[in-house]
Image (cartoon, rainbow, N blue to C red):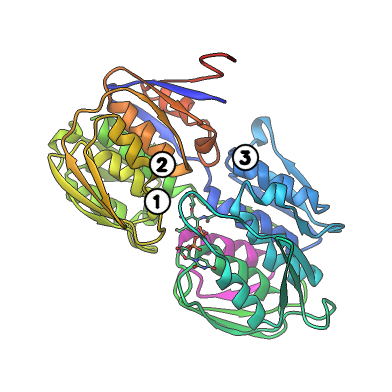
Amino acid sequence: MDKFVVRGQNPLLGTIKVSGAKNSALPCMAAAILTENEVILENIPQVRDIETERKLLSSMGAEVELGYGRAQHRTRIKCGILSDPVAKYEIVKTMRASSLVLGPLIARTGIARVAMPGGCAIGDRPIDLHIKGLEAMGATINYDHGYLEARSPNNGSGQLKGAHVVFDKITVTGTEDLLMAAALADGESLFENCAREPEVTDLAALLNAMGAKIEGAGTGTIRIKGVSKLHGARHKINPDRIEAGTFLIAGAITGGDLNVDGLNPAHFGALIAKLEECGVKLDLGADHIRVRSSGAANLEAADISTEEYPGFPTDMQAQYMALATQFEGTSVVTENIFENRFMHVGELNRMGANITVQGRTATVRGKTPLQSAAVMCSDLRASASLVLAALVADGETILDRVYHIDRGYERIEEKLRGVGAQIRRMGDVFGKK
Ligand code: EPZ
């Protein structure tokens, strides 16, 4: 298993490029199920979850070509015939977002068999709201030995029906899954209390380019006029606002002068306001943000509370906590979205941080000089927070299980090295026993 070795205390200087958004690419790849024609997606990040999605779609009979060389961020998908509309457990267990094929499969083929996603490091993460919405559209869904067995009306031969759905809770992939189902449903659907994340808007843009009739994506209320058929399209995926946010904090925590390039500043709402509240200098350009700080020690402590978009993103909570260990003063971090998203706390404390957790609240007492240590990655964003901590720690930190970070960050060590970080990937550092 790969590890990272990071020698800390180098300010990051220069320009770092942002890749396409993993959380846009996954639903957009699933959307290709809705048509027999070719869908071409540009700006696809080269991360492990995309490879898993490719395996998932190919296992169902789709032709999926991940580009390489100059076209390495282009993906061509053709779901001409879906010979085996089953999302197998072996694949689903490695990536929860596999549940995003449920709606499109029922809408396109009338039948879907999708392995139930099991538990997850950051929380239970049920998909009951996906199921409830699809049932409102006329699907029958049964549980069969760890799988969801779903059929459209008339035992899978009929079309889903347009429906009025009010989500009990805001759910990103729930909104996306139902959006894809409703695009090919018979009649009009009205969805309320929807997720407003830019990834939802990005998916809706692709679906409309495929011939769907969707209005209101990006707001809490979305209207969809179902159509009988969708066609192929070409679409460029949004830049990854979470990868970009991670780099903004890397610039702030190392006391660097970093230009984070290839992003959409409009996607950062609460994160920008919070970093400026702490005293981080940010210059916003049309597609880049320059971050400057003379080191986190001169930054003010500030509390955060994670919310649905446009509130402070839960996917930035761990990275912000790493920064808060370097503030003068105490910051309170409240996690409102997931019930178990403090896996990074124990590892940060191993590096010398002073963080206590009570339920969904963590209290970070700064400033605590961080020391190098051997630490363990546990989930995608927790791993990013450990990389950030290692960038300011004295000495060499060894991060184990970096496969977690490869799920959602494209060659992060090369990108950081390009702006002055001392970080390298090692195969089995200690060698087989
Ligand atoms: C998406 O997950 C993202 N994943 C997550 O990013 C992100 O943390 C999350 O949205 C919140 O922003 C992708 O887009 C692939 P939710 P999702 O459904 O859709 C509860 C990362 O780091 N809920 O919005 O699975 C759920 O348990 C990942 O890139 C139900 O109760 O999250 C949670 O508490 C991690 N029933 C809350 O809603 C449901 O049917 C929000 O979850 C669905 C969700």
Image check: 27 left or right of 245?
right
Q: Quadrant of the C terminus?
A: top right
The count of marks equals 3
Residue 104 seen by the camera = yes
Give whichever of 69, 393 is nearer the camera.
393
- Decide: few, some or many residues near mark 1? Use Cα within 10 Å; few <14, some 14-19, many ≥20: many
Q: Which mark is residue 341?
A: 1
Going by the numbered disc 2, the residue's amino acid type is Ala
Give whichever of 163, 350 is nearer the camera.
350
User: What SS does tag 1 mark?
Assistant: loop
Question: Taking 289 as reference, is 418 above or below it?
Answer: above
- The residue shown at (66%, 60%) is 116
- The answer to the question of whether label 3 and label 2 lie on touching residues, with beta carbons closer than 8 A, is no
Pointer 2 residue Cβ closer than 8 Å to ligand 1? no
Q: Which residue is mark 2?
A: 382
- The answer to the question of whether label 1 and label 2 lie on touching residues, with beta carbons closer than 8 A, is yes
- The residue shown at (70%, 38%) is 67
Question: Taking 139 as reference, is 290 above or below it?
Answer: above
Query: The magenta stretch spans which residues?
Result: 197-218
Distance CA(mark 3)–CA(mark 2):
26 Å
- The residue shown at (33%, 58%) is 306
Q: Which residue is mark 3?
A: 73
- Decide: few, some or many residues near mark 2? Use Cα within 10 Å; few <14, some 14-19, many ≥20: many
- The residue shown at (28%, 51%) is 272
Mark 1 vs 2, N-terminal side: 1
